[in-house]
Amino acid sequence: MSTMKSINTLWSAGRRQVARIGLGAAAMLTTTLALAVNDLPGGPAVRQLDLHPAVTRIAAEQRGLHYLMLAICGVIFLGVFGVMFYSILKHRKSKGAKPANFHESTTVEVIWTIVPFVIVIGMALPATKVVVAMKDTTNSDITIKATGYQWKWGYDYIKGDGEGVSFVSTLDTTQRVMSDLGKPEGDNYLLKVDNPLVVPVDRKIRIITTANDVIHAWMVPAFGVKQDAIPGFVRDTWFRAEKTGDYYGQCAELCGKEHAYMPIHVKVLSQPDYAKWVEARKKEMAAKADDPNKVWDQVALIARGEKVYSANCAACHQANGKGGGPVKPLDASPVVVDADKGKQIHVVLNGQNNGAMPPWRQLSDTDIAAVITYTKNHWSNQTGQTVQPAEVLAARK
Amino acid sequence: MSAVLDHPGAHAHDEAHDHPHGWRRWVFATNHKDIGTLYLLFSFAMLMVGGILALLIRAELFKPGLQLVNPELFNQFTTMHGLIMVFGAIMPAFVGFANWMVPLQIGASDMAFARMNNFSFWLLIPAAVMLVASFFMPGGAPAAGWTLYAPLTLQMGPSMDAGIFAMHIMGASSIMGSINIIVTILNMRAPGMTLMKMPMFCWTWLITAYLLIAVMPVLAGAITMTLTDRHFGTSFFSPAGGGDPVMYQHIFWFFGHPEVYIMILPAFGIISHIVPAFARKRLFGYTSMVYATASIAILSFIVWAHHMFTTGMPVTGQLFFMYATMLIAVPTGVKIFNWIATMWRGSMTFETPMLFAVGFIFVFTMGGFTGLILSVAPVDIQLQDTYYVVAHFHYVLVAGSLYALFAGFYYWSPKWTGVMYNEWRGKFHFWGSLIAFNVTFFPMHFLGLAGMPRRYADYPMQFADFNMVASIGAFAFGLMQVYFFLFIVVPVMRGKGERAVQRPWEGAQGLEWEVPSPAPFHTFENPPKLNAAANRVLG
């Protein structure tokens, strides 16, 4: 059904697009001007032609290597095509050129095999040094685990200043709405998140990547970092930011439909500011921590569950609970309305269908209890059931 | 009636070689020329389907924000565009060329296994139908990218299975086609045509066919493991059961890298015929061309993990694959130098085949340079999975493989159809395509350097202008190919145009020019007697 629907929208929209293209270049220019946008410091610049300005030594080395490669390739390009175009201009039949008879020369052929070989070695040597430096993740000051979820990033500070801090970073919801409406706005369109990753300047930060469902990739161009986040495995990379500021990247490995909507925002603070941030964050976490044994009333759980649902579930199951395509509906779902609450708790905790419905163990007991209570008492699901956090805690074991 | 479709009288005397007419001629085709035509028409149809998907992608990316499709459908478009172009358009097109040209070039009467030839073509039809029809299955077409990385493939709907079966069938077809080509080339050359006198197109296809036989089963294995992970409870790639998603990538790219050479080596072969023909001078360094092709093929087996630098390989792994990849530049360079040395002090004219050949050398080399830049692992970390990679592989696959196919069409179509294409139209097709191609793909280098990831349905607004330029170029490029079909291919197929003589190109060498234009239904029924260079028929 949804396929047919999307094809229909596609068809009518396609006709609109054809008409729009028909309007020609002048109309296009006005559209561009309508999209007023400026460079985003630490993110992409308008009509950027080059790699991002380097904020780490590795990124600077990458930039240097890229220039070196461009220069070598440029010289070869000019040389080779200089000869070719000279020949094209001079050795034409229309200019009375008579074909020569030569068709091999061992000397020439040996030379043009050996010379490129030497050039390639000249490229490989400086690159080798950078590879070795890039892969050296030892002696880090702070270690942070970045976990890719469909479609958000989870950050856990696991060693160094800030140890114990942990949060999830999601695209600002207004951005996704703007995208759907086709009305993008702002210099940080699709790059704005609710909770940026915060790190201190001039400290070696080791990022350990992993993922919860499919492969994602954690990328920040200004740091020269791109590392796949692979479910079931851990990989690592590192950076040492030399300037404070905000730096942006996006997920760089196809991870499903919302692939374009899980950006990375790293805020680099001075060391005193970082210490303050850690302190504030820890207080906040202590205040927020829910006691899983607290008994909630249904109304409070449903109110909380609605938020949890729109942040985590609505991307697939839709706000109306109908799902779509392979995503099962929750509205009138036999599992959701079942008298045995354990069934739904089990699915939410452990996932289903090879991870198409991912496990949500990373949510707190209270969040899971809230969202289940919400789904059991929303849309046409008026079961009246309440799931308490303690029940979720028990099911985890 | 059509010249391709009609061969009056040429074989009427020969009862033993009578063949069915009407639809039965094509369904039961065993003639290498008919099967070649079928392959070429099929691949052009798939080029159009893949092209429409590409234009839908470019239409969505014309402006930031979602205008036409939702991200789910967008991912289906990128995935199916890739699969259809690689397995439906480029690979079968080269097999079509091989069917038409290999027997003609080696002086054989037909392909070695005529009925298997028929089967390997007709297998493609159900495979293509199944692949395209997957759009209409519940959940839509596969949306995991043409590389079909696990574990994303494990989340896909039933269309994933259809896609996997389609690729199994296409793989079987490719393997049969390869066996046919190898056996034909090794056993059916006319007396006197030793391997080192064989035309370059046959050499490159011989090597390509071995590559296909070596790697298509590897792909089949990878996608079969995906299938059993999806349905039979295995955990080859599913981390939940202890499987390794990166293992899939290793297996896939062990197929995938030779695959890119499968799509370019026959192109090298075509260019190696056209440049000497229009420079009126023998190919420079024939022997080194053969060795360079073989070296590229062998090296292609030890570079696969350069597609995976960002998966987090150990230092030694990155270094090995970086060095090995850089090495490929050497034999590839040798080929470029040989072509230019062939042009040097020739007596050149620039009919459409030569324009496409020179365009190929120029633009393909740019794709080669970006490949070299990508081989440097630290630079690749910045560029992997961005539009730079998209630009790179379209420079080698469109300006490389597709341009060589166009060059080959213009060069050999007089032999196929018996009429000359319209030269002005051919030149218009060339210049239009060249300009539109570069308008489309050159800005993508900048997008990639600026960090725009590929397979994105929507993007930050700073990327808007280059995306708009690329989209405009893409529509122009698409229109040029429709023009090519309607105003160049259709007329020559219908036999409209100046009659082609037996050797329409002054400098063209090889046995295909020893038979009349259009080539009669049966050629070289008795092994021809060849001159010492094995490029002329004596008597």
Image (spheres, coloured by chain):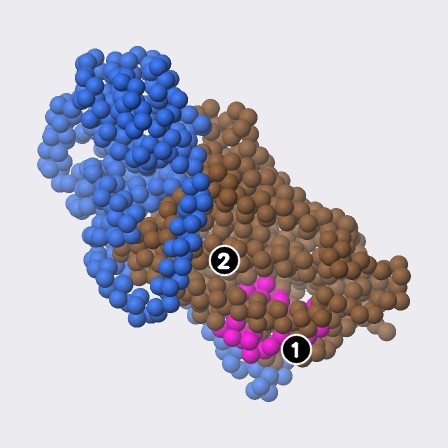
Chain colours: A blue, B brown
- Note whether residue B148 is visible: no
Q: Is residue B162 above or below residue A55?
A: above
**Could you tell me which residue is drawn at 52 percent across and 65 percent down?**
B481
Residue A199 lies, in percent from the top left, at: 20, 37
Is residue B354 highlighted in magenta? Answer: no
Task: Report the residue marked by disc 2.
Answer: B51
Q: Is residue B198 left or right of residue A27?
A: right
Would you name the residue on which mark 1 appears? Answer: B497
What residue span does the magenta drawing correspond to?
B403-431
In the rendered image, the quadrant that contains the C terminus of chain B is: bottom right
Q: Which chain carries label 1?
A: B
Badge 2 marks a residue whose secondary structure is helix
Q: Residue furthest bottom?
A: A96
**In percent of the image, x 18 and y 22: which residue is there?**
A300
Query: What kind of residue is marked 2?
Result: Gly
Which of the image's four quarters has the N terminus of chain B?
bottom right
Q: Is residue B61 at all visible to an observer of this figure?
A: yes
Q: What residue type is labelled 1?
A: Gly
